[in-house]
Image (tube, rainbow, N blue to C red):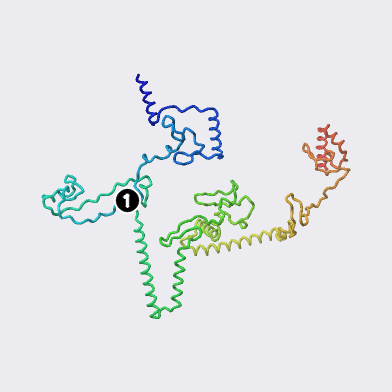
Amino acid sequence: MTEEATVAATANVGAEGIVGLDEPKKMTREDWRKKKELEEQRKLGNAPAEVDEEGKDINPHIPQYISSVPWYIDPSKRPTLKHQRPQDETEDLYSSIGEWYKRGVQENAVVTKFRKGACENCGAMTHKKKDCLERPRKVGAKFTGTGIAPDEHSQVNLSLDYDGKRDRWNGYDPEEHQRIVEEYAKVDLAKRTLKAQKLQDELASGKLDQTEREHDSEDEDEDKYADDIDMPGQNFDSKRRITVRNLRIREDTAKYLRNLDPNSAYYDPKTRAMRESPYANTGMNADEVGYAGDNFARYSGDTITMAQTQLFAWEAYERGSEVHLQADPTKLELLHRSFKVKKEDFKEQQRESILEKYGGQKHLDAPPRELLLAQTEDYVEYSRHGAVLKGLEKAIARSKYEEDVLINNHTCIWGSYWKDGCWGYKCCHSMVKQSYCTGEAGIGVVSTCTGTIQRLCWDTWYICLLL
């Protein structure tokens, strides 16, 4: 009986306009097919996207269980994404960016009469007698009406979000910075006025003429602009007298881009240093490349000379000479120079004594290496395959012995064939020197009796040694 009443009540509620719990009607197969085709067209962009109740487009790729409202909630509602967005009633309200605590105590009129509801001890309206922090009076302000304390300054209660609590400029008044700018402007104006007055006094007394005054003002401007210039690769702050290391110049090629071989010089990204040369394995000299590593710049100039002098000081100290690079550099320099002169003289005397005893001066007066290798200034241009395109090909260097001389009907020279430790002729595979060529027939015979030919080869070689 109770279930029937409940169903009847539900039907009546639906008739009165309130949402009922009737399940949606089942779609036909044709309607289902049209719905799927429309979804596919919307996903491809051929059909306009579906619009929610607020007039916003719904992404067709969003699943239906997210965009559609369940039938048991409200079957009359259209698909929407409002329930996926932040709800106004659940969002926390925070203080705006312009709200901040009040600075200082607001000056009010001095109260001379006790007010109803005020503290009976001091007369302030912001607290009661039991919360009063002043010294308890023998006779309170309620009865004397004198010495009434001012009201306490109550701050506003701010509700800040995550960023507001960590904002270092929160509550900053821009007018404070404007006052600082005006103060510096007044100081600069006072300096200019004082300097102009000083120049006028010097000009009036004759200590400074007009041309020198103009020249000094130009130098002052140049110095002023020079302080503001940043050097390439560093930033110099003239106010604090410090140098800040900056990034590399953007026009320069980065060190790690000069050679992309992973086995080339190591680049340290933290210190931006590449000590070795990136062109070390390319066969290029240090003078031919624009960058040869940090060690090349480090060991250039007087650095090598300084290191040699320091090494000489250590060696001299070990041999009993009291010299030091930092303590007495002049003495060390003179001693090093005299040592190098004596060393060169000793080498020259030793060389002359060896030549005088053994001779061989004519071998030291040999022509230059360029002439020995037959290098000329003739221009020859080659193709990528090695063929000569322009100029004359370099002549092949020949020895004093006869080459490519064919004897006894051979088509190949002796030594063109090698097998089992013996030399022979390639044309007939004969291992006997100065033998007659037998051609293809000889190759067939040698292949059938390899052991005999090898013994004959070794016997011939032994006979040649005896002769």
User: Does the image show residue 252?
Assistant: yes
Amino acid bearing label 1: Trp
Please name whichever residue, 87 or 408, is drawn nearer the observer in this view of the structure. 87
The answer to whether residue 323 is seen in the rendering is no
Q: Nearer the viewer, residue 351 or 194?
A: 194
Query: What x and y, as percent, mark residue 177?
Result: 36, 59
Q: Is residue 383 left or right of residue 177?
A: right
Q: Residue at x 51, y 59 (%)?
A: 232
User: Which percent across, then down, holds residue 100?
Assistant: 32, 51
Compare residues 286 and 53 and report the one nearer the observer.
53
Q: Quadrant of the N terminus?
A: top left
- Whole-percent x and y of residue 322? 48, 60
Secondary structure at badge 1 equals loop
Query: What residue does disc 1 label?
Result: 100
Taking 373 as reference, is 463 above or below it? Answer: above
What residue is shown at x 57% (from left), y 49% (from top)?
265
Q: State the residue lying farthest toward the top.
A: 1
Which residue is pictured at 75% across the width and 56% down the height? 380
Which quadrant would the C terminus be assigned to in this image? top right
- Asked if residue 3 is positioned above or below residue 245 in the image, the reply reads above
Q: Residues within 10 Å of mark 1 (few under 14, many from 20)?
A: some
Residue 175 placement (x, y as % from top left):
34, 58
